[in-house]
Image (cartoon, rainbow, N blue to C red):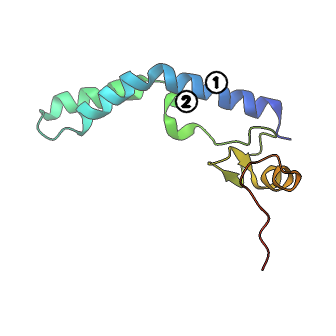
Amino acid sequence: MAKLSSTNKNERRKKLVVKYAAKYAALKAIAGDQTLDETERLIARLKMAEIPRNANPTRVRNRCATTGRPRGYYRKFGLCRIELRDKGNKGLIPGLTKSSW
């Protein structure tokens, strides 16, 4: 189990990303547009710097839905490798079978 503070911090980051997503995308489009004047692009980059750091989507960490574990995360299931194996062996994940050869 991950610390509750770590999972809560990640949830706060997800909320900030959603809150600032439109503004962040608009400023990023302006900053990356080569046809615009250099000063306009610089102003857009400065405004992007004023947005909170945790509003950047890259700061959100994928975590297991049940344990909060950050490593060994499978996006398709939203679980870490340990929980995926445990739930798969119990038959709680439809279509998942144990491989043997």
Q: Give the percent coordinates (x, y) of residue 96.
A: 74, 56
Q: Give the percent coordinates (x, y) of residue 43.
A: 25, 26
Residue closest to the eye, 77 or 16: 77
Where residue 35 is drawn, which disc sits there?
none
Residue ID for mark 1: 12
Which circle, 2 or 1, is nearer the viewer? 1
Residue ID for mark 2: 54
**On the image, which quarter does residue 33 sit in?**
top left
Task: Point out the image quarter for the C terminus.
Answer: bottom right
Q: For the point 71% across and 54% down, which residue is it? A: 95
Residue closest to the eye, 10 or 48: 10
Crowdedness near tag 2: few (<14), some (14–19) or many (≥20) residues, C-alpha within 10 Å: some
Q: Give the percent coordinates (x, y) of residue 47.
A: 34, 24
Q: Disc 2 or 1, which lies upstream in sequence?
A: 1
At label 1, the amino acid type is Arg
- Say above or below: 40 vs 101: above
At label 2, the amino acid type is Asn
Element under disc 1: helix
Q: Give the percent coordinates (x, y) of residue 30.
A: 23, 31
Q: For the point 40% across and 29% down, which residue is it? A: 49
Q: Is residue 25 left or right of residue 9?
A: left
Q: For the point 76% across and 55% down, which residue is it? A: 81
**Circles 2 and 1 in contact, beta carbons < 8 Å:** yes
Residue closest to the eye, 95 or 46: 95
